Image: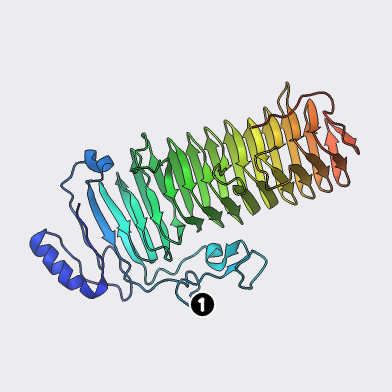
């Protein structure tokens, strides 16, 4: 396996040695503080065949950032200490570790003046081992960008017209880091068109596969096509901006611990769940939260499934699925939601003992159109409360609940008629499914 280390202080020595021993040409530095493919660049000609990709014997570039650890992406004014990442929600400017989104999460543009630029090439894997900002550009096949940084490192990948097509491995594979940002600065595409190959005991199943915290943001469009999942995060996944067109045979977006969204546009076509936030190892985790964004989800199973909670404080959702949304506790405080379902529109079910089984509507707009047969628009294996907002249901069975049910406020319309009281299994229908 060929390894090339990027290090500014040793670059000229490395370039000379490489040119003499490997026939590698280094271009002169034409940018003041930027490592680009026309500046500090090593071009590698691999002699390995594409068939060696799955055996990890292909050419690999190991990249060490030549810039200082970045804490100032975007405006360059938030630096206070190495690896500092103040957190905030969209309404707050204060620094707090209790909020959902950090300031860096919410920054859609990145200062790349000190970034390292990497141009992908066919059959050449890239390994990033140091904290920093890396601009990824070019078009190639059979390329995996590995991130194997220290557990306190923050790594930001800026996709600047990057197009990668693989047959059996993720385009981006995060093994170790504190947190990774995938930021779009110009339209990019990532695809896997064959069967995924495992990495030892790790089952790889997504075009972007991360074992650690992952944030999606940016100003451009990322198109993902996958024979497995689109994006899988085995920790906390956040999205704060960008446009994502995901076509996947498996789940569109998968997050083991949580998925939190402040903004972004998501068009998802999935063979399984559109959004899958399930933690079978710890049923006190596995949640979905939204305070903004636009979602157009078409899926063969659930539109959104979570182990613990689905909490919607904002956003626009159009979901066409077997079941629209499912979690132990589903709460809607705001937003616009349209669900077209063939089983349950919304199902609050007993997936976790850490939360009360309930559906609660406090605001926003909810429209549910159900298929014919033994289906329920809103099915709760616990309580069902509508306290505010607008609910418009077209269904054979509008409500099905095992606990208490009440309309305490808002406007509720069932099959064209306004109702002020919930009748269990209204207008017929059956029990919601338990999973």
Question: Quick check: 220 above or below 370?
Answer: below
Q: Quadrant of the C terminus?
A: top right
Q: Name the colouring of the figure.
A: rainbow
Residue 189 pos. (x, y %): 41, 47
The residue beneath circle 1 is 77
Residue 312 pos. (x, y %): 69, 50
In the rendered image, the residue lying farthest to the left is 20
Residue toward you, 118 or 212: 212
Question: Quick check: 17 above or below 386?
Answer: below
In the rendered image, the residue lying farthest to the right is 420
In the rendered image, the residue lying farthest to the top is 373
Residue 244 pos. (x, y %): 51, 48
Is residue 120 among the parts visible in the rendering?
Answer: no
Residue 38 pos. (x, y %): 26, 65
Question: Quick check: 134 above or below 345?
Answer: below
Count of all numbered marks drawn on residues in the image = 1
Image quadrant where residue 32 sits: bottom left
Is residue 256 among the parts visible in the rendering?
Answer: yes
Image quadrant where residue 325 sits: top right
What residue is at 37 percent from the left and 68 percent from the top? 115
Q: Secondary structure at mark 1?
A: loop
Image quadrant where residue 416 sits: top right
What residue is at 53 percent from the left and 36 percent from the top? 269
**How would you rate the neighbour count of disc 1 (Cα within 10 Å): few for under 14, some for 14-19, many for 20 or more?**
few
What residue is at 36 percent from the left and 56 percent from the top? 147
């Amino acid at each position: 396996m060929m390894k090339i280390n990027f290090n500014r202080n040793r670059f000229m020595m490395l370039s000379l040695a490489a040119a003499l021993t490997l026939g590698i040409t280094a271009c002169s530095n034409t940018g003041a503080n930027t490592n680009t493919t026309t500046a500090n660049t090593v071009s590698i000609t691999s002699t390995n065949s594409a068939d060696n990709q799955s055996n990890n014997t292909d050419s690999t570039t190991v990249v060490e950032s030549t810039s200082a650890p970045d804490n100032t992406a975007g405006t360059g004014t938030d630096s206070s200490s190495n690896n500092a990442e103040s957190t905030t929600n969209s309404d707050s400017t204060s620094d707090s570790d209790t909020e959902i989104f950090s300031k860096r999460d919410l920054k859609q543009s990145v200062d790349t003046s000190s970034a390292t630029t990497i141009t992908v090439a066919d059959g050449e894997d890239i390994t990033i081992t140091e904290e920093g900002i890396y601009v990824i550009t070019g078009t190639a096949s059979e390329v995996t960008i590995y991130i194997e940084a220290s557990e306190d490192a923050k790594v930001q990948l800026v996709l600047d017209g990057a197009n990668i097509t693989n047959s059996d491995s993720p385009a981006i594979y995060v093994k170790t880091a504190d947190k990774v940002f995938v930021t779009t600065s110009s339209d990019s595409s990532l695809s896997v068109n064959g069967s995924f190959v495992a990495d030892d005991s790790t089952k790889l199943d997504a075009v972007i596969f991360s074992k650690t915290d992952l944030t999606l943001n940016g100003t451009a469009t990322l198109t993902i096509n996958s024979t497995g999942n689109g994006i899988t995060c085995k920790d906390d996944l956040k999205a704060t901006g960008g446009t994502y067109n995901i076509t996947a045979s498996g789940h569109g977006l998968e997050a083991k611990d949580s998925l939190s969204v402040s903004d972004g546009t998501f068009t998802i076509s999935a063979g399984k769940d559109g959004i899958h936030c399930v933690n079978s190892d710890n049923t006190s985790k596995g949640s979905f939260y939204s305070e903004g964004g636009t979602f157009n989800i078409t899926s063969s199973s659930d539109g959104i499934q979570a182990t613990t909670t689905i909490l919607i404080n904002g956003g626009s959702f159009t979901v066409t699925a077997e079941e629209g949304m499912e979690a132990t506790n589903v709460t809607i405080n705001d937003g616009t939601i349209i669900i077209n379902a063939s089983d349950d529109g919304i199902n609050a079910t007993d997936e976790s003992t850490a939360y009360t089984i309930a559906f609660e509507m406090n605001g926003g707009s909810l429209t549910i159109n159900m298929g014919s047969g033994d289906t329920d628009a809103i099915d709760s294996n616990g309580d069902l409360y509508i306290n505010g907002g607008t609910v418009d249901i077209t269904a054979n069975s509008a409500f099905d609940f095992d606990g208490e049910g009440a309309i305490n406020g808002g406007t509720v319309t069932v099959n064209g008629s306004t109702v002020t009281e919930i009748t269990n299994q209204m207008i017929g229908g059956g029990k919601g499914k338990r999973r």
